[in-house]
Image: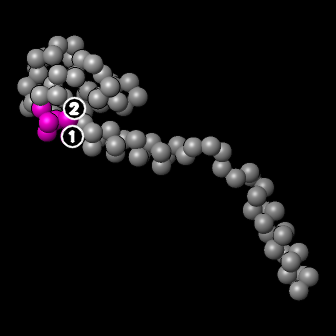
Amino acid sequence: MPEHDEKRWTCEEFEKALPDLFERAEGGKLSADPRFAAILRDCPQAAELVRDLEYIAETARMLLEPEGEGPSSDLWGKIEREITSKDSIQ
């Protein structure tokens, strides 16, 4: 199998190496690595697989690391007090 820095991959070699390549890819973006531009251009099936894997990885990352802060820790207490106070008024 060619070294990762070389650009003489066959489509089959590249696809077999994808798990290792993704593990080492910075930010999980293999498609952004210029070392693989030629193989991704020449092997549409490999390029599609890389796009799919990057999409899956990004979606999983968003599910595990939601953006922004969540509700404050006392939010549910405030909601409960508000509901209770409205119930006592009625």
Vertical arrangement, residue 65 with respect to residue 32, above or below: below
Which residue matches tag 1? 49
> How far apart, in angstroms, are the residues tagged by discs 1 and 2?
9 Å
Amino acid on which the number 2 mark rests in the picture: Leu
Q: Where does the N terminus fall, quadrant-wise?
A: top left
Q: Residue 47 at what x, y percent from top left?
A: 20, 35
Q: Residue 57 at what x, y percent from top left?
A: 36, 41
Q: Residue 26 at what x, y percent from top left?
A: 38, 24
Does the image show residue 16?
Answer: no
Badge 1 or badge 2: first in the primary sequence = 2
Q: How is the image coloured?
A: one colour
Looking at the rendered structure, the secondary structure element under dot 2 is helix
Residue located at (78% from left, 66% from top): 79
Vertical arrangement, residue 72 with respect to residue 12, above or below: below
| 76 with respect to 20 (left or right) | right
Range drawn in magenta:
43-48
Mark carried by residue 77: none
| 23 with respect to 60 (left or right) | left
Which residue matches tag 2? 18
Residue located at (22% from left, 13% from top): 5
Looking at the rendered structure, the secondary structure element under dot 1 is helix
Decide: few, some or many residues near mark 1? Use Cα within 10 Å; few <14, some 14-19, many ≥20: some
Residue located at (17% from left, 28% from top): 41
Assign the magenta stretch its main secondary structure. helix
Quadrant assignment, res 34: top left
| 69 with respect to 21 (left or right) | right
Mark 1 or mark 2, whichever is nearer to me:
1
Tags 1 and 2 in contact by the CB under 8 Å rule? yes
Vertical arrangement, residue 50 with respect to residue 32, above or below: below
Q: Residue furthest right?
A: 89
Q: Residue 68 at what x, y percent from top left?
A: 62, 43
Does the image show residue 15?
Answer: yes
